[in-house]
Structure formats: C-alpha cells, structure tokens
Amino acid sequence: MKKRLFSLLFTLSILSACNSSTLSFSEIDTVPSDVQDKIDSKYVVQLIDDGEDTSYIVFHSKGTVTATIEAKRDTIQVKVEENNQQNDVMKQYVYKLTKDPEHERIDLYINGESTPIDHVTGI
C-alpha cells in the first residue's frame, strides 16, 4: 500500500512539474546591454528575440503605454493600450516576455487593432 501511494505521489509530482508554466510578461527599467544595442528608435514596435524562450518588445510612444498578454494555444497576444498622446517627447517602453515552448507566435494589438511588428531581430 505504501509503495502504491509513494508511486502515485511521485508520478503526480513529475506530471505537475512537466505542466508548470514559465509564461511571464513585465515592463523592465534596466535593459540588458545586448538588447539595448539592438534597439532602433526609428521603429515604433520592435521585437528582439534571444532564440530561446525570451523576447523583448520595445514600444516607442509619445503617450502613456500599458501592456498585457493573453495566451491562446500556440499564440501569445500582446495587448497594448496607448493613451494621452499629447506629449511631445518620445518615450521608450521595454517589456520582457518569457514564453513556454508551445508558444510559436506573437500577435500584437494596439488599442484593440491588430498591428504588425515593425522590426524583428535576434541577440
């Protein structure tokens, strides 16, 4: 009986570890130097990918920007809301996205509108 219980608990712990998600998304203030070297201010939206599981989304705006993500199957939807575009100064917003292996695609929406990413590069 104890062996069965131990075997069941061991199997459940392995299965739960396999299903753990690494998906995360946050704005960062300190941009890694290898990412900063790739940022080009002529692009409004830029995606910089490390070739593994991390991408950086760079957004330039004269307004206030907030961003969230939503995962749907193999796609991550990045939803950006841009407000108060009365400012004359362009500000850079950098977001770090850590993806799960099943996420193969990133779709960008700005104020609800599907928007292409201006430039994609790797580090």
Image: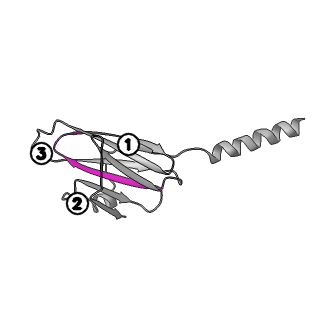
| Residue 21 is one of the magenta-drawn residues | no
Please state which amino acid type lies under the numbered disc 1: Ser
* Callout 1 secondary element: strand
**Residue where numbered disc 3 is placed:** 89
Exactly how many numbered labels are in the figure? 3
Residue 40, label in figure:
2
**Which mark sits nearer the N-terminus, 1 or 3?**
1
Residues rendered magenta in the picture: 53-64
Rendered residue at 37%/51% (across/down): 107
Tag 1 or tag 2, which sits nearer the N-term?
1
Above or below for 121 versus 55: below
Secondary structure character of the magenta stretch overall = strand
Q: Secondary structure at mark 3?
A: loop
Name the side, left or right, on which 9 lies relative to 30: right
Circle number at residue 62: none
- The residue type indicated by label 3 comes to Val
Q: Which residue is mark 1?
A: 26
Q: Report if residue 29 is visible in the image.
A: no
Q: Residue at x 33, y 64 (%)?
A: 121
Mark 2, secondary structure of its residue: loop
Distance from the alpha carbon under mark 2 to that under mark 3: 16 Å
- Quick one: label 2 or label 3, which is nearer the N terminus? 2
**Residue 22 in sight in this render:** yes
